[in-house]
Image (cartoon, rainbow, N blue to C red):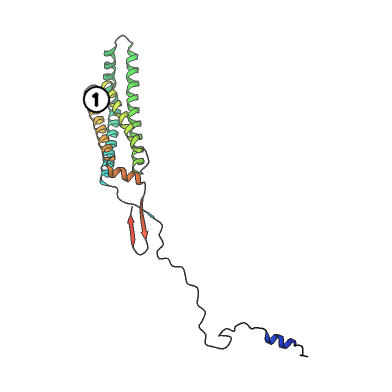
Amino acid sequence: MKPEATISDLEAARPQPPVAAADRGGAGAPPQAPARPTLAGKAAAPVLVKLAPPVSVRLAQLGWVLSLVTGAVAVVYLFIIRETQLPEMTEAIKAVDGTRAEETYSTAAEILYWTAFGILAVVLLVQVTCLVSFNNRRPRARWWQFGSVMLLGIALIGIRELVAVGERGLPLTRLLALQVGLALLALAFSVLPPALKWSARRHDVRAVSPGVGGADL
C-alpha cells in the first residue's frame, strides 16, 4: 500500500503566490504614480467683460443727457417766472370766460401752473430712470422712453396754450420743444440695428479656450 501523505507534503504541493522582484532581492523598477487627468481640450467657463457700446448707443445716450439737461433748465425757468407768469395766465383764462369772480381766475391759474410744473418734473424723473434702465439693457426700456416723450409732447401743447403766455413764456416753449426734439433723436439712434443687438445681448461675454485666447461675444 501507498503511504498516506503527510501535512508537510500537502503544504509543499500547494501553489505559492508569485514573489515580487523586491522580495526576491532583484533590482525591480519603483512603482509608478497614477497619471493626472489632463486639462487640455476642456472648454473654460465664459467670462463677463465690459465692452464699449456701439456708436449708435453712445449717440442715444448723449441725446438723452442733452434732453434731460434741457428739461431741467425748463423746469427751473418755469419756477423762476412764476410770479410774473401768473397774472398773464389769469388774463388768458379770463379772456375765455369773463363772467366768473376774480378769485376763480387766480385759483385756476395757480392750478394750471402747478399742474404743468408737476408734469414736467415727473416726466424728467421718469426719463432719468428710463435712461438708467436703457444703459443697463433692461427690456422694454425704449417703450417707457417713448411713452415719456409722448407725454411730454402733450404737455408741451397744453403749456404753450395755457402757461407759456406772454413774452416770458416764449423761451419756455422753445426749451420744451428742444427737449422733445433731442429725446426723439435719441430714440431714433437707440432703435438702430447695432443698438438693438447691444440691448438684446444683455451681457458682454468672452469665451476663453485654453492655449488659444478668448473671443468677445
Q: Is residue 128 left or right of residue 31?
A: left
**Would you say 40 lies left or right of 74 here?**
right
Reply above or below: 210 against 163.
below
**Percent x, y of residue 208:** 36, 59
Residue 181 screen position, x and y as percent: 24, 33
Residue at position x 26%, y 19% from top?
88
With 70 as the anchor, is 38 left or right in this view? right
Q: Quadrant of residue 90?
A: top left
Determine which residue is flagged by label 1. Answer: 169
203 is higher (above) or lower (below) than 88:
below
Q: Is residue 132 above or below residue 163?
A: below
Picture quarter with the N terminus:
bottom right
Camera-side residue: 10 or 184? 10
Looking at the picture, which amino acid does disc 1 mark?
Gly
| Residue 196 quadrant | top left
Along the viewing direction, whichever of 154 and 28 lies nearer the viewer: 28
Q: Name the element at disc 1.
A: helix
In this view, the residue in front, 4 or 65, is 4
